Image: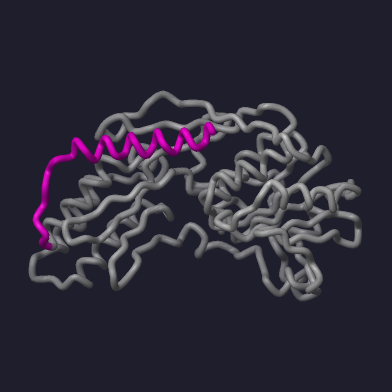
Amino acid sequence: MRKILFFLIGLVSALCLSCVDEEEFDDTPQGNFEALWRIIDRHYCFLDYKQHEIGLDWQAVYDKYRVRVDDDMSQMQLFEVLTQMLGELRDGHVNLSASHDYGRYWSWYENYPANFSDTLLRRYMGTDYKIASGLDYRILDDNIGYIRYESFSSPIGEGNLDDVLMHMMLCQGIIIDIRNNGGGDLTNADKLAARFCQEKTLVGYVQHKTGPGHGEFSSMEPHYLEPSSNLRWHKPVVVLTNRHVYSAANEFVMYMKALPQAKIVGDHTGGGAGMPFSSSLPNGWSVRFSAVPTYDAQRQSIEFGIDPDYRVDITDADFARGRDTIIEFARQLLAS
C-alpha cells in the first residue's frame, strides 16, 4: 500500500504542478521548443543533482539548442533537435514520442560491457527449466537454485513465488538473475523482495516536487519493505546485475542490498531513480520525464546506478569455455 500511495502522491503532485503552469505556446517549431524546455525546467526532478554530478546547466542547454530551431525546419528536423536536447539529461526515463519516432537515451548501458549472454544462459538453463509466470527457474547441479527474471513488467503472483521457493526448499542458496532487466512494475519488485525480508526494513526514501524551482521538494519520506506473509527464504541469496538493470529493477537491487542475507554480484546497475510522468507539446508529441526522485537507505541518489557488493565481469576465457563468470562466482559465494 505504501508504494501505491507514493505513486498516487507523485501523480497528484505532478498534476497539480501542471495545473498551475498556465503559459501557452504556439504550435510552431519555436513554440514547441520553448514548451519542452519549460516542462523540463519546472518539473524534471534531477536538474540540481545533475548540475552537481555532471555539470549540467539547463539554461546553457537552452542557449545551445535555441539557435538550432527556426520556423522553417521540418517536423523531423525539430524532433532530432529536441531529442538531442533531452539527451543532455542522461536519463533513460526521458523520452519524446511522435507518430514517426521515439526519442530515447540508451547510453546508460550501450557504452558498457554487456556482462550477459543468451548463449551462455541456454547452457545453464537447458530446455527443461520450469516456468512460473514471469520467472524461469531450475536447480543447478550443485544444489543452488537459479531464478531468471527478464522484466518486472512480467507479472508474478504469490502462488508462483510459493511454488518456486517450495521447489528450492532444500537448496543451500538462490541466485536471482535480473541482468538485462530494464524495469517495469514496482509492485513486482516489492513482491519478490518481500520473500527475502525477515523484518520491516528501511530500504529508501522518496521526495515530491512542491514547486517549479529546481530545488523545491518535500522532505524525504521513508520507504519500508515489509516481510511477506507467505513463504519466505531465510538462507543466502545472490542477485546478479549488469548495466542494463534499470528503473524498477534498479530499485529491486536497492531493496535487496538492504537485506543482510543478500549479496549483489556483477556490474554497476544502469540506474533510473525517478518515477516518470508524462506531458505533451502543442503539436501533440508526448514527453516522459523523471518527476519523483528516490534514494537508498543512506539517502543517496541511485539515479546513476548501484555498485555491486562484488564486481565481476564475464571474461573472454570463460566465455570461450561456455562459462558465465558472474554465475560461477555467485555459485562459489553461496557454496562458501
Measured from the top left, where is residue 146 in percent x and y? 78, 57
Closer-to-camera residue (120/14): 14
| 281 lies above or below 262 | below
Q: Is residue 22 left or right of residue 85?
A: left
Measured from the top left, where is residue 98 in percent x and y? 28, 66
**Farthest front residue in view:** 159
Q: Quadrant of residue 202?
A: top right
Residue 183 shows in the view: yes
Query: Is residue 27 within the magenta segment?
Result: yes
Measured from the top left, where is residue 61 in percent x and y? 24, 51
| 53 lies above or below 311 | above
Q: Is residue 263 left or right of residue 270?
A: right
Closer-to-camera residue (318/208): 208
Q: Is residue 115 left or right of residue 97?
A: right
Residue 124 shows in the view: no
What secondary structure prevails in the magenta region? helix
Q: Work out which quarter of the rendered image holds the N terminus and state it.
A: top right
| Coloration of the structure image | one colour
Residue at image coords 20%, 58%: 65
Residue at image coords 37%, 54%: 94
**Farthest top residue in view:** 219
Q: Which residues are magenta?
A: 1-28
Closer-to-camera residue (233/303): 233
Measured from the top left, where is residue 210 in percent x and y? 31, 29
Query: Is residue 231 within the magenta segment?
Result: no
